[in-house]
Amino acid sequence: MKQSFYLAIKYLMFYKFRTMVLTLSIGLILFLPLGLERLISESQSQMLARSDATPLLIGAKGSSTDLVINTLYFEKNKIEFIHLGLLDTLNNMDLGYAIPILSAFKARGFPIVGTDLDYFSFRNLSIASGRNLQLVGECVIGSEVAEQLDLSVGEHLVSSPENFIDLAGVYPLKMHIVGVLNPSNSPDDYAVFTDLKTNWIIMGLGHGHQDLQALNDPSLILKKDSAQITASAKVFMYNEINTKNMDDFHFHGRMSDYPISSVLFVPKDVKSGIILRGRFESKELKEQIVVPTVVVENLLQTIFRIKKIFDMVFVLIGIATFIIVFLIVILTLKLRKDELFTMFTIGSSKYKTVEIVGFELIITLFLSSSIALVFYGLTGFYIETFIRNFII
Amino acid sequence: MKNRIWGILMVFVLFSCAEPVEKKKERIDEKLKVITVNYPLYYFAERIGGEWIDLKFVIPTNVDPAFWNPDEESLKQYQAADVIFTNGADYAQWMKNVSLASSRIVNTARSFEKQLIKLNTKTAHSHGPDGEHEHQDRAFTVWLDLKLALKQAESIRFHLSKRIPDQSDGIDQNFEELKKDLLSLDSQWLKGFHKYHNQIIIGSHPVYQYLARAYDLNMESVHFEPDEFPSVSQWSELDDLIKKHGSSIMLWEKQPSPKIEKEMNDRKMKIVVFDPCGNKPPSGDFLSVMQENTEAIVGR
């Protein structure tokens, strides 16, 4: 037995390249269905965990999937805005509390999420260093943002301009990083959190500029009378909010008309949630309300249909691989005809030959399984990327 | 011996009955944390919520809460509160620059938004692609119209009852008592101010808009500080008003300095101290300050 094992090892080591190719091929064939299964099942559990933890979402009428993806993952889809006034209406219904979300801008590739302090307590997000948001112009960054951009408390992050050609339009805002969140293994790790008002300043709905009453440069003032001052676009706009210029920042129009992407609603109890949904269904409120879990489950069902096709492909590939391995063994035995004859001549039994070839197969399969397991382990690190690139 | 045993037993019973300090602290922590942006709202919340709320007032006594800016520590108290009662009418502009949980902010002026007084100080300006926009302020001392103050108190009652349903009966009872006090004061003011209907009163500051509207007063305002001697142009502005309206009464938020008082006497202007009581008074409370205001009106 020991000798057969020794001879099998020696044989495999002698044909290193062939052993490597065979081991890797079988390893990959074993890994692919397992890996995909893991990616999908873990993505499913992660996505459902996020959606299960979000009782109700309210947003503009349109695609419910876009609404959920935008609010839960702060991803891609720019959905139609709703008005902040809805938040007040919802909070005054005595059915629970509402958390606003405004996710429309990015800073160095990471989404800027405008919200309020309830969001942090609702998602159980804790501060690893620094403090939570206090003033406009500040931001708190997720752990992955901090790591990938190598940023820490006290540094700055500039919002990405939406349109480089529109020089007189939306100005990039230099935000002060006041806190870094602890990792939560969720999309919150990849987000830059600000107060809603900071987002509105990025949008250009609020801004800070030189005091128009005190301007001395006549080229900055186009028209001035007791009731109206018309300044030129040359007037200096602040691109950063600090304690010195904070009072110069102002918002135009009624705050209740200001845009938000969606509202995350936390009902007091199940009954309150149903009552609220009823009010949307009865058209008392014109926006749409969705249960994120239902939307995510629908989305995952589509993915599962694709997964079934993959499963069939893998079964076919598995059968093909098995036939190829079988063929390789047969051909190998043919090639080793002289070698096996020598073994018989020096007194080796037929059983011994089977034992040596069997060990060779077992070792190859063991190595292939090990490779498959290593790949399977590594898959865990790519679940977030998989969700972002293939599901959302 | 028997007495000693009884003594030991008594001490044991007393100790077992006493609430541990930590537990007591925990009980206080469990109370609804309430904070307000000015003193009148604090007073209403204190009267209505009583012992069932953990009420905080973090505004220093030497500032006007309308123009105060909280420091980091004060802001933390606002962020930690379960309910923040605000005055509405753009009062406490600092709230526009800070992060707070919107579900915890209660605008006590929400029910009478349309009754708020717009000030004639708007300046429209335009620049860039936004086009013309204007910033118009609203008068904010709403509580000087005691019927509006009552509506603010009603809002506090409603939100406290909602959040502490177990104590809603007590909260309602406290509110009724406050309501009685405010309405009694209101009728005193209606009577007290009646005698000024045929003259124009000058306010040392433009803070009496709601008072004037509610109690049918004709008022003009200047910008005098009680402890800061006015400039020549300010005196001349006052002289013009006196000449134009034949006014003989001026309402002050605080007793002006003797130097100002002398100048006022020279102009035969009577000083009536009518404290809006936006901040915590050094002594007494909102009601006692308003009673003093009443005496100042009636006593003339």
Image (cartoon, rainbow, N blue to C red):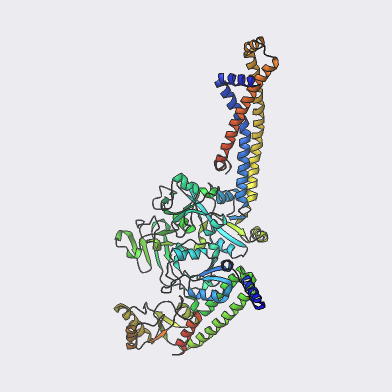
Q: Nearer the viewer, residue A76 or B285?
A: B285
Q: Nearer the viewer, residue A288 or A339?
A: A339
Residue drawn at (57%, 82%), measured in percent from left and top? B180
Q: Residue furthest bottom?
A: B300
Residue A195 as seen in the image, left or right of residue A323: left
Residue A48: x and y, percent? 62, 48
Relative height, residue B261 to residue A293 (above, below): below
Residue A123: x and y, percent? 56, 54
Q: Nearer the viewer, residue A160 or A223?
A: A160
Residue B296 as seen in the image, left or right of residue A119: left
Residue A56: x and y, percent? 62, 55
Q: Residue furthest front?
A: B1
Relative height, residue A351 to residue A241 (above, below): above
Q: Quadrant of the N terminus of chain A?
A: top right
Residue A191: x and y, percent? 50, 50
Residue B165 as seen in the image, left or right of residue A228: right
Relative height, residue A314 to residue A102 (above, below): above
Residue B253 quadrant: bottom left
Residue drawn at (53%, 50%), measured in percent from left and top? A188
In the rendered image, is residue B95 in sight? no
In the rendered image, is residue A222 in sight? yes
Relative height, residue A119 to residue B264 (above, below): above
Q: Quadrant of the C terminus of chain A?
A: top right
Number of numbered discs on residues: 0
